[in-house]
Structures are given as structure tokens and as C-alpha cells.
Image (spheres, rainbow, N blue to C red):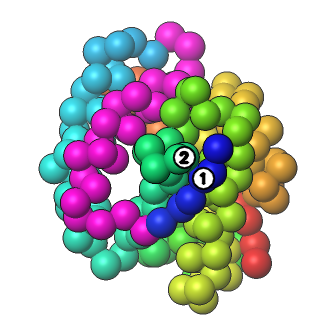
Amino acid sequence: MTTTVRIASIGDASTLHRLAAATFGLACPPGTTQAAIDDFIGTTLSEASFSGYLRDDSRVVLIAETDGEPAGYTMLVFAEPSDPDVVAVISAHPTAELSKVYVLEGHHGAGVAGALMTESLNVASGRKVAGVWLGVNQHNARANRFYDKSGFATVGTKKFLVGGHWEDDFVREYVF
């Protein structure tokens, strides 16, 4: 199988929404209700939301395709964080947030996430940021192992709201 990664275009909004709908729940901690997952997908990860993200000059969305079929995506946000918990622990400035890293379950362990991460860091480096940060649920062991392997250090914690419930996230940072 061949995986390629490219910058998404406005025509990819529907595909990105479908990827998000299929992958967001995989990253949620145990106990997250399907209603909360559906609400988050319907608002933050809707096709209209992706259309907006793709038109936003401060964001870059990357899409991975395996043998021409969508397999995962990432989103970088080129802006300083506003969350006080993140601001307190990020050391590299200017910074970018790696806001989303999602891969279809059938492609886990096949190198898709690694390809997306490599290209995401290349794009960030090309924009001359000093580092990249992300938030990841503390109970998502698979993702945390991947971020360790990718060079992201745990530098603090923050809260993340899903379905009216606050989740505990690690803040991780990659410094160039």
C-alpha cells in the first residue's frame, strides 16, 4: 500500500467530515457517551466547520490517502494558544497547535499516522515556528505512545470539554 499526504483543499470538506465522524470516537476516553461524540462531530467537526477551517489562513489541514483512498488527517493552527494552562507550559515561540491527528482504525499501525506527523512537522517548520504543541487525553495510551515516539514531551495538563464533561488532557510539545 502507498500512502501520500497532501494539503487539503476546500473540495475536501465533506471527506474530512466523514473521516472525523469515523475517527473522533476512537480518541475519546472510556465513558464518553455516543451523544457527546455525535454532538462534537456535528458542531466542531461538521462539513461546514471544515469548510471554515480550510478557508482560514491560520490553519493547514493535511489529508493522508492510502492507495488513493482517504485514511486520516491532521490540522495545524498557526496562532499562539489562548488557554491559560497551555500558555503556562509551552516554551517554544512562535508555536503552532497540532489540533487534530486522526487515522481510520483499519489503517492503525500501517504508517499513516507517521506519514501525517512527518508532513505536519515539515509544514510547521516551513512556517518558521519554534515548536508545535497538542493536547491528548491522558487515558489515550495508544496516542500517547505515538506522541512519545514522535518526539513530543509532556509539559503540562489542560481541560478539554466534550458533551458538557471536562476531560483531562496532557499538553505535549515538540521543539525544533
Q: Magenta residues?
A: 7-31
Say which residue label 1 marks. Answer: 3
Q: Quadrant location of residue 125?
A: bottom right
Crowd around label 1: few <14 · some 14–19 · many ≥20 (10 Å): some
Seen at 16% across and 50% down, the residue is: 48
Q: Is 108 left or right of 163, judged from the image as shown?
A: right
The quadrant of the rendering that contains the C terminus is bottom right
Name the main secondary structure of what is drawn in magenta: helix
Is 22 magenta? The answer is yes
Q: Is residue 34 above or below residue 41?
A: above
Image disc number at residue 58 = none
Seen at 54% across and 46% down, the residue is: 66
SS class of the residue under badge 2? strand
Q: Is residue 75 above or below residue 26?
A: below
Q: Is residue 5 above or below residue 103?
A: below
Q: Is 66 left or right of 125, judged from the image as shown?
A: left
